[in-house]
Amino acid sequence: MSRTALRMLLGDKTKCLGLVFGVMLTTLLMCQQISILIGLLNRAASVIDDAREVEIWVMDPSVTTIDVPFPLRDTALPRVRGVEGVEWAVPFFKAGTQIRTRDGRLDGGFIIGLDDDTLIGMPDEFVLGSAQDLALPDAIALNPAGYALLFPGEELQLGKEIEINDRRAVVTGIVDVLPTFNSNLLIYTRYSRALEFTNNGRNEMSFILARASDPARVAEVSDRISTQTELKAVPSSTFRNESIGYILSNTGIPASFGTVVVLGILVGVAIVGLTFNQFISENLRQYAALKAVGVGDGTLLRMTLLQAMFVTVVGYGLGLLAAAAFLAGASNAADGLAGFVLRPEIAIGVAILAVLMVLASTIVSMRRVLVVDPATVFRG
Amino acid sequence: MSMPDEANQIAVQGRGVLKSFRSGETKITVLRGTDFDARIGEMTFLVGPSGCGKTTLISVLGGILAAEGGAVSVLGEELAAMRRGRLPRFRLANLGFIFQQFNLLPSLSAAENAAIPLVAQGISTGKAERRAAEFLDRLGMGDQIRKMPNQLSGGQQQRVAIARALVHEPKVVICDEPTASLDASAGTAVMELLGEAAVSEERSVIVVTHDNRIFKFADRVHHMADGMIFKTESGREAAESGVL
């Protein structure tokens, strides 16, 4: 009876389209909003993720996110280096700054200073130039989104000059990193130069980046650093989660996105529920006739489930395509929108939600099919 | 399944059938312990004024409603003794239904509608539709098998409904006011067709009607009033008297 069930559904084009549209709209909203939310949250930890060789982040005990560092004393670095099990430890600077272009454009961003000798914490991928070029006088590397902010509409090009706190800086590299949560503009440079750019002197080290001699003992070495230096030392993954948790706890973003996702589900339930209920109502006499003929409740239940699952699969597929197209289009349209991707786990999660939504929406209608009295077909 | 009583070839039998409905606090008794017989090889009419209980009685005889009292047997099987899940399968295998409003699925073609009992029995769609198309051809609908119900006249839709009721070769066919939605000529044509296609030595046809123009097609006519069958006569006698 599967074909009969599908023919019943497809025969009523208006309701079939309404059902598919309801599921598609909900899928699109959920996929798009969750992808953007997760993309934004990942940006909160993108600098941590980009420093791939770093295993341990050391900071002031009061720090809970990479975006709000508290300066460490310069003496902290040798103390961390002296802890047993630490293979190496290097300084890391991160601070907000003002940038002005030659044509007077003013913008704000983050400057990241990396250890002069090792450049530990530098992302691997460069679009233009290389990490070695940071050894050149006044050299900095920009991310593509930052470049687009400072030089809108211009092709990526090395040699561009900007001013950071009235000091000359030359773009010698374009580094392929995503914008952070707080700013699209990221400037990578050597540690000593970062201090010059920001007019800071001593005791301006934001973090210490370290690595354990034994990769299996990262947590143990972190604890030892904390105990011996009275600083906070955590594995990269822990600091990543803390930085994301800070955004979740201290901004309205999760509530805002969550509200849209919940509204999407409610709208989907309303559209699918009402349309499916109307579809069943208009076919109730036919279902009663099938019952009278001898089609069993189990078969009728399978028929309605098949109809519900058909609209789920088609609507979900179209919604997924629309969401993927939207996110891909947004990423291609602007560097600042890069990194919002439709991950497989989001697609799977939304698929489960879509199935649950359709089942919740149609369960009342299915019950009506099961309880319809076949004798109604004899009542003219 | 046991065979019907060989002695009198009774296909459907009701004895002392009771049925009532509740409407709020009020209990309405519709069948008051009525008896009913329909024989194999005959077309049996159940006639009477509106509200006398005809539809309720055929619903009980067809296993669609449960009797509150008395006994109903179809092809020798007590319906009350059947498990709840078996009754639909019994109907699917042994009964065919023709409804006043046709109740064709609007999004299925004539052949697809007629094939429903076969598909529900588990026969492949293609095979079922071929058999349904052959049956429709026998009913003069060979050139209409791909048409949708809304492309067919009332008489043509009822022919599709007849095909659906007979395609799986049931032993009992129950027709509820099969001519009520048709004009006189279409109604007569449908009854002639039903007489030719449905009545056989191995089948019993039960027709509920209050259309006295078609009494001539009946072998026997049960007259019903106020929840009871009060008179049974031959079709010819009923046609001559013309009284419901």
Image: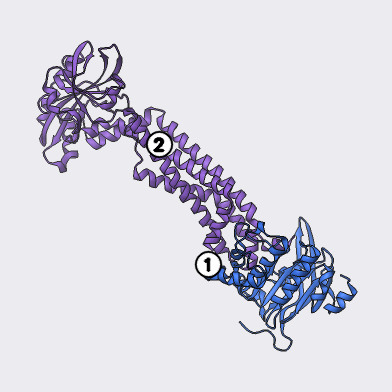
Q: Quadrant of the C terminus of chain A?
A: bottom right
Which is more toward the observer, B94 or B98? Answer: B98
Residue type at tag 2: Phe
Q: Residues within 10 Å of mark 1 (few under 14, many from 20)?
A: some
**Quadrant in the rendering for residue A89:** top left
Q: Quadrant of the N terminus of chain A?
A: bottom right
Q: Chain of mark 1?
A: B
What amino acid type is highlighted by mark number 1?
Thr
Whole-Å distance between the Cαs marked 1 and 2?
41 Å
**x and y percentages locating residue A3 in the rendered image:** 52, 61
Image quarter of residue A50 = top left
The colour scheme used here is by chain
Residue found 59% across the figure and 51% down from its top: A12
Instruction: In the displayed orientation, state which residue is furthest to the right.
Output: B241
A93 or A354: which is nearer to us? A354
Q: Nearer the viewer, residue A378 or A89?
A: A378
Q: Residue A173: tell me if it is visible.
A: yes
Q: Residue drawn at (19%, 35%), measured in percent from left and top?
A: A52
| Chain coloured purple here | A
- Measured along the vertical axis of the image, is residue B109 above or below residue A195? below
Which residue is disc 2 drawn over?
A326
Question: Left or right: A356 with respect to A110?
Answer: right
Q: Please give the label number shown on residue A25.
A: none
- Tell me residue B147's x, y (percent): 62, 60
Q: Which mark is residue B125?
A: 1
Q: Chain of mark 2?
A: A
Element marked by disc 1: helix
Q: Which chain is blue?
A: B
